Amino acid sequence: MRPRKVLVASLIAVVGVAAFTAWWLRADKEDPVDPRMACHVAVYRLDDGRLIDIAPITGNGLRWRGVDGRTGKLQQGETGRWSGSIGWSDRPDPTDVQLGTCSQPVMTFEGHRGQRLSFATTETRFQGHGETLAGRLVMPPGDGPVPIAVMVHGSEATSARTYNYFQRLFPANGIGVFVYDKRGTGDSTGKYSQDFHLLADDAVAALKEARRLAGARASRVGFSGGSQAGWIEPLAATKSDADFVAVAYGLADTPLAEDRDQVRLDLIAAGHGPDVLAKAREVTDATGAVMVARFKGGYDRLDAVKAKYASEPWWKDMKGEYTGLVLRYPPIALRMFGPDEGTSWEYEPMPVLQSVKQPLLWIIAGADREAPPEETRRRLLAVAKGKPNATVVEFPGTDHGIIQFVVTPDGEREGTRVADGYFRMLVDWIRDGHLGDSAYGDAAVLARANQGLSGSAR
């Protein structure tokens, strides 16, 4: 009976890793936004002057955002009234937001009526690195020159033209925006990829297209984005005539380090000490070798750390970006189904960051679990010390996305809002070329362009 049990176990593992592959490769087709939701997507100016954006979310529903960072999810009930939940939680939100229906649209927020804003929009298709990409230029009202932000993607595999809300928030604040669907997403051709060099070439092509479409209205044109964009934007800047680079919650370390540092945080959260962290580093070095080999090799090293440590109690507490998943499945299943998105696993960003000549704004999430910030902070301050063009800012106590959170009784983080000051900071820096004199919530300016290190809070 044992051979049959082994075969069954192997089949279960293969099925499991195949499901894992489908998730990793984002194999599910992106569903169109429900027309009953899509008709409300816009940015609204309230009668008290505030701006509220209504954006679609993947799945079903809408999300409202204020420039102050408050946000919530919206659902329409059977009676036609809208209700929501706070931030990214399931807790009911007392904020009164009403949108009416598609046939009778109306927007009220906390008793204030909203006026839907519209912008000059140009759809386009342009040539990236071997693929045809779908893009959109959105310009604020008027005919004078304005800065334009080319929005660079994170790791999401959804259409930026559908889901990137900056295409409304920035124009409402006098900034043009160019959004485009990453290769293999939305209406762009090709296969989804995390090859930073290909994606940087696509971003360079997007910047050229934005300049072409904007014509005389383009003043400064540069890159803005978050997360994975922190690897792509500086690389694209060195290949282009971009005028600025704005990065939020990205890493100035390698993608392999992202997993390593996440595993470290997992183990610290579980109460393990330095001896365990040293052992775990051996494990992440081994799982990283499998990733670099794109699941085709590295298994002798992986088998060695499994034999050495798999029986120890801390083994189960490792998760990370990929380590926990790689450890879960046998090599034969990983060889057969291990996903390869072309990720530039060994990409070292420091030489590129040192060569970026454009003004650079980097915003760190101080309690980021997805992109742990310690080494990134150290590296960025080293860059800023020797370069007059870098501004480094940190929002303490925020997670990936500059999101504030509460910790639930079971130890999970529950996102409640975006930090106050984050959106204003991006707008001021892109629109005016520098940070303004007003405060940006709890943000701490760690280094300021042309002024070196400061450590002061604003």
Image (tube, rainbow, N blue to C red):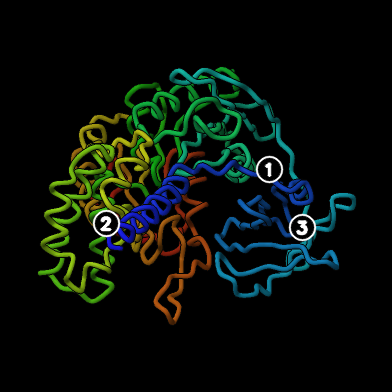
Q: Which residue is mark 2?
A: 327
- The amino acid type, in three-letter code, at marker 3 is Asp
Q: Which residue is mark 1?
A: 32
Mark 1 vs 3, N-terminal side: 1
Which quarter of the picture shows residue 271? bottom left
Mark 3 vs 2, N-terminal side: 3
* Residue name at image x 60 percent, y 69 percent: 86
Picture disc at residue 274: none
Residue 13 image position (x, y, % from top left): 36, 54
Q: Is residue 243 above or below residue 438?
A: above
- The amino acid type, in three-letter code, at marker 1 is Pro
Q: Which residue is mark 3?
A: 47
Q: Is residue 120 above or below residue 275?
A: above
* SS assignment at label 3: loop
User: Around disc 1, counting alpha carbons within 10 Å, would you say few (fewer than 14), some (14 to 19), or many (20 or more)?
Assistant: few
**Towards the viewer: 282 or 234:** 282
* SS assignment at label 2: helix
**Towards the viewer: 456 or 108:** 108
Would residue 70 be seen by someone viewing this image from the given angle?
Answer: yes
User: Around disc 3, counting alpha carbons within 10 Å, would you say few (fewer than 14), some (14 to 19), or many (20 or more)?
Assistant: some
Residue 230 image position (x, y, % from top left): 36, 41
* Residue name at image x 19 percent, y 43 percent: 289
- The amino acid type, in three-letter code, at marker 2 is Leu
Position of 413 with respect to 301 (left or right) is right
Question: How many circles with numbers are drawn on the protein?
Answer: 3
